Image (cartoon, rainbow, N blue to C red):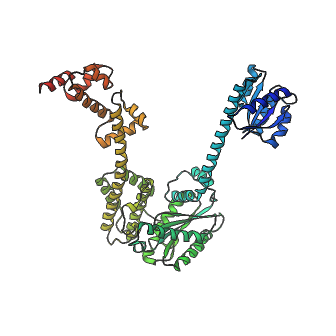
Amino acid sequence: MYKVMIVDDFTADRENLKDILNSISDADICIVSECENGLQALESIQNCQPDIIISDIEMPFLDGIGLARAVKRDYPNIKIIFCTLYDEFEYAREALYLDSYGYVLKPINPEELRECIVKVSESIYSEFQNARAHEELKKLLYESIPVLAEDFVRSLVYGLIKDEKQIWEKAEFLRLDIMNKAYVLALIEIDDYDEIAVGLTLEEKQILTLKVYEKIKKEIGSDTGVLTAKLDESHFVILFSCLRGSNDEEYTKKASDTCNNVLMRFNRSDVTITIAISGHSYNIQDIKNLFEQCSYAIRHKYFLGKGKIIFDRDVPSATKVPDIDINQMQKEIRFLLNAGRKEEISRYVNKLFDQVPHGVAQSYYKNLCFSIVICMQVVLNENNCGFEEMFEGKNLIWEKLLKFETILDARNWITNVFVGANALLGSKTASKNMIVVDEVKKYVGSNYDKNLTLESVASALHYSPNHLNYIFKKETGETIFEYVCRFKMEKAKEMLADPRIKLYEIADTLGYSHSAYFSSVFKKFTGLTPKEYRERCFAL
């Protein structure tokens, strides 16, 4: 029921309005207030809270235009309809400027007012529905903040967000108190995950991972300076943000104390974990580097044992990786995984190993392998896939890196993983590309009677012309223009076999505006003019 306020300084006009409004049967309205001028209306609005105000313009104390200005400023959701004797341009223009929903002249035409009321009612209902839908979406969004916060942490860990302004905008939206802090990262790995997971169903594996993750979060509690994220089935990260000003040891103390508590909880359970803790950084964009420190450090559980905390500072050369430019390596691996061939990948891996100076410790080769795998993992994550699609039922890739006995074994294994990841991405891309190719062919098959161009096909399918043409040629070996021409020529051959169809009819059916142009295209593709082709058909 929409509440209506009537504002008019003439009693007779107010009574007339009431009679008309009460006669409107197709709008749910009720009259909640009658006022003699704009000033009285403003005093009454707070109490009766109308949805619609029907007002005269010329009134004492405060006229209708002044009332509309005040309502627009203080009660923007109220709709105003002007009913007045005045039809001069300036009044009408002012009413439109003030977003009035009607301008009805006196004497009032009941049907005109009814249409105006119905229009306003529908507008109010529509706004209500939109507002309710917006609030429901907003509620869902804020209910998803914990999940979005985890995605945010993963993006930082894998270096997927590089722009600092974008990082802070997301942190502010997610209400994360991490700006201008010192950052420390902890990486948690489930010990002997492969052995534990043997024989488990996919559901049971997921439950195991969830159980471990919930236990980690429960131990951390509601500390706003600590964020967590699950990386895969057996790895989790904790991001600590600390106030600046403490000494270096204080930055890692919070992480150390928290991780000790987490470790103790798991030491009393049937699942044990190993935790690596990084150094600290004042730059939020260095989270990726802190993750690399932790990932390198946690590999040393092979030497130090399971169920312990390993600090980056206690691992020799954990952050000193000579002659490895991670950023350049990332660019090269991204290109090779997305577009490289097997022989190019093999040459690249050989180059990385061959350029290592003689006499370098074995740990450096392991670090090289680890850096390559980290870069591959980032590219796979960018393409919404991961190593788990390649290593089902096998040892975790991170543990595998520790078990090579010779450099040759490491080199061959890295090459095979590289080629496998390239094939995985290639299969996903090829599958997507064939869907696009099928779309093009289906569209051409349904519209060959038109003057088809690359631009018209791309526009109809909502693709960039160059990108669409590139995909089509890559998968079929011919451009879209060549395919369209070939398709039309095949149709032309079918029609030429029927002597009743004239050449100009064939040209018109195939979307060619001139028979001569059709003939030249046909000869280019078949070596014969349409007439020669038809004669040959009937000569056989």
- The total of numbered circles placed on residues is 0
Q: Residue at x 75, y 32 (%)?
A: 21
Q: Is residue 190 left or right of residue 174?
A: left
Q: Residue at x 42, y 34 (%)?
A: 460
- Report the residue that reaches farthest toward the bottom: 268
Toward which corner of the image does residue 515 lie, by quadrant? top left
Q: Is residue 434 left or right of residue 245?
A: left
Q: Residue at x 63, y 43 (%)?
A: 129
Toward which corner of the image does residue 393 lie, by quadrant? bottom left
Q: Is residue 139 left or right of residue 384?
A: right
- Could you tell me residue 250's position as x and y percent? 63, 70
- Report the residue that reaches farthest toward the right: 61
Quadrant (top left, top right, bottom left, bottom right) of the N terminus = top right
- Could you tell me residue 277's position as x and y percent? 53, 69
Toward which corner of the image does residue 253 lie, by quadrant? bottom right
Q: Is residue 318 visible?
A: no
Is residue 454 placed above or below 427 in the rendered structure?
above
- Could you tell me residue 65's position as x and y percent? 79, 29
Quadrant (top left, top right, bottom left, bottom right) of the C terminus = top left
Q: Compare residues 240 and 293 and report the one nearer the observer.
A: 240
